[in-house]
Image (cartoon, rainbow, N blue to C red):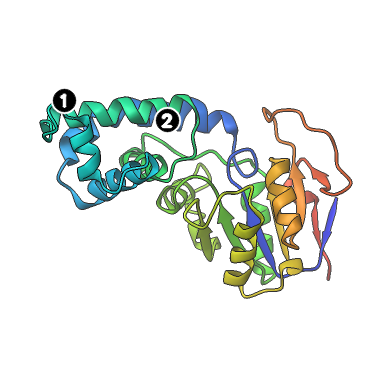
């Protein structure tokens, strides 16, 4: 049980509000399956070009144009088909290595958009999550999300969940553009954006390294142990919960 008398709750997604299995067994395979088709159909679209710029930056290039020339065997820009295949290869390598690349997460979000909007995918949330979110919101708490998935993907996820549209319950979203989830500075920035003292914010996650960073920034923390999560040792620093209804609001 966590007794909380603060004013803001910050939530991780994968392994906290939602099943790790859904992300790895449904969302990631969908992005991989649709990647080549999406690149071919959207190649000149602004959103995709911005994602490619981010991928190039993550790979250490000054621009996507520089990356394109690097891919060409003669120093010239390769054909769109060759470029698309190079992006597919690079993105699949990032996914295989589970690298939290901003460019990768942006591109995945663009691909997932079609799956959620078509109804082919509905985001999994644990049964205790929607009523807890509603209760917290009605109590006047400020609810926000911090995930390695892009902000656009987060909004799609909660806007198309198995429990319906939960997006309106959240007033803020953060991703890797704020900073790495295991860095204390990221949580200091988030607390500033909340416009609350850090100790008035509760961060719930299934990853102890993230909770350690948040705790060092002054946030209250709770460790989520959900079905399918890797086993973790209970910590006096981070109270363990198995359901959001174990967060008790002080009256």
Q: Residues within 10 Å of mark 2 (few under 14, many from 20)?
A: some
Q: Is residue 196 positioned above or below 43 on the image?
A: below
- Assign the C terminus to one quadrant of the image: bottom right
Q: Is residue 188 visible?
A: yes
Residue furthest to the bottom = 195
Left or right, 61 with reference to 147: left
Out of 128 and 13, give the one closest to the viewer. Answer: 13
Could you say which disc has been placed on residue 94 in the image? Answer: 2
Question: Which residue is pictured at 49% across the width and 26% down the height?
Answer: 97
Identify whether 131 is placed above or below 109: below
The CA span between labels 2 and 1 is 23 Å
What x and y, as percent, mark residue 242?
77, 40
Q: Which mark is residue 73?
A: 1
Residue 63 % position (x, y):
26, 48
Q: Does the rendering let one see residue 113?
A: no
Instruction: Between residue 108 and residue 179, name the one nearer to us.
Output: 179
Kindly state the secondary structure of the residue where label 2 is placed: helix
| Number of the label disc, if any, that sits on residue 205 | none
Residue 237 vs residue 180: left or right? right
Q: How many marks?
A: 2
């Amino acid at each position: 049980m966590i007794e909380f008398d603060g004013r803001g709750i910050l939530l991780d997604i994968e392994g906290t509000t939602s099943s790790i299995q859904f992300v790895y067994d449904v969302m990631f395979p969908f992005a991989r399956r649709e990647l080549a088709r999406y690149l071919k159909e959207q190649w000149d679209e602004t959103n995709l070009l911005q994602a490619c710029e981010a991928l190039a930056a993550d790979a250490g290039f000054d621009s996507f144009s520089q990356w394109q020339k690097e891919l060409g065997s003669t120093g010239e820009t390769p054909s769109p088909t060759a470029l698309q295949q190079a992006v597919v290869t690079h993105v699949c390598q990032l996914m295989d290595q589970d690298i939290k690349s901003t460019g990768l997460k942006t591109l995945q979000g663009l691909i997932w958009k079609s799956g959620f909007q078509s109804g082919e995918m509905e985001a999994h949330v644990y049964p205790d999550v929607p009523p807890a979110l509603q209760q917290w919101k009605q109590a006047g708490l400020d609810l926000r999300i911090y995930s390695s998935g892009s902000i656009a993907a987060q909004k799609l996820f909660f806007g198309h969940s198995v429990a319906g549209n939960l997006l309106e319950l959240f007033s803020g979203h953060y991703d890797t553009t704020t900073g790495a989830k295991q860095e204390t500075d990221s949580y200091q920035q988030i607390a500033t954006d909340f416009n609350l003292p850090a100790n008035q914010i509760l961060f719930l996650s299934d990853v102890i390294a993230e909770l350690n960073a948040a705790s060092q920034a002054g946030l209250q923390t709770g460790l989520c142990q959900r079905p399918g999560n890797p086993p973790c040792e209970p910590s006096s620093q981070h109270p363990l919960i198995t359901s959001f209804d174990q967060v008790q609001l002080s009256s």
